[in-house]
Structure formats: structure tokens, C-alpha cells
Amino acid sequence: MAYIVLEPDESIESALRRFKRKVISEEIIKDLKKHAHYISPSQKRKLKSALARKRNRKRNKMKNQNGQS
């Protein structure tokens, strides 16, 4: 659970910005989306495989761009 302590002379806007950064850094939204609905084990494997392929394509693309320079 993300929480912040409001400083005596701190504005609400800056406190809200700090809170949003903390929520992002603790990956609360990501975790919430992950648990929003059930994903079967086979779908998890397919998703993991697809993300790995995407990551490898991106990595190979960067290698090719750097190698051709």
C-alpha cells in the first residue's frame, strides 16, 4: 500500500505528484491489472512467449542498427 506523509508547508498538488510517482514505482497499477481477470496457464505461456519474441526482435533490430553504422 502506497502512502505519503504530507509535509506542513507542502501543497496538495506536489503531494499528489509524489503519491502518483510512488504508486508507479511500486507497480500497484500493473499488479491491479494483472489480477483484474483470470488468465489460464496456457494463455500465460503464450503471452510470455509473445513478449519474449517481441523483446528479441527489438534487441536484434538495435544490434543491426548499431552494427551497420
Image (spheres, grey):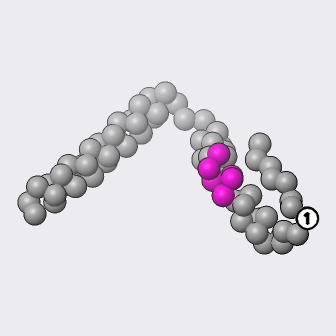
Residue 33 in view, yes or no: no
Q: Residue furthest left?
A: 68
Pick the front one: 64 or 4: 4
Secondary structure that dominates the magenta span: helix
Where is residue 13 drawn, in percent x and y? 78, 72
Rendered residue at 33%/40% (across/down)? 52
10 part of magenta stretch: no
Question: On the picture, is 33 further left or further right than 6?
Answer: left
Residue 62 image-quadrant placement: bottom left
Q: Amino acid at mark 1?
A: Pro
Rendered residue at 35%/36% (across/down)? 49
Q: Residue furthest front?
A: 9
Q: Quadrant of the C terminus?
A: bottom left
Residue 38 image-quadrant placement: top right
Rendered residue at 59%/41% (across/down)? 34
Question: On the picture, is 24 further left or further right than 52?
Answer: right
Pick the front one: 7 or 18: 7
Which segment did they paint magenta?
A: 21-26
Mark 1 — residue?
A: 8
Pick the front one: 8 or 1: 8
Rendered position, 11 above or below 39: below
Where is residue 51 drawn, in percent x and y? 37, 43
Question: On the picture, is 48 further left or further right than 25?
Answer: left
Q: Residue furthest top?
A: 41
Question: On the picture, is 37 further left or further right than 11?
Answer: left
Pick the front one: 51 or 63: 63
Q: Quadrant of the N terminus?
A: top right
User: Crowding near pointer 1: few (<14 within 10 Å), some, many (20+)?
Assistant: few
* Tag 1 secondary structure: loop
Where is residue 10 drawn, in percent x and y? 84, 68
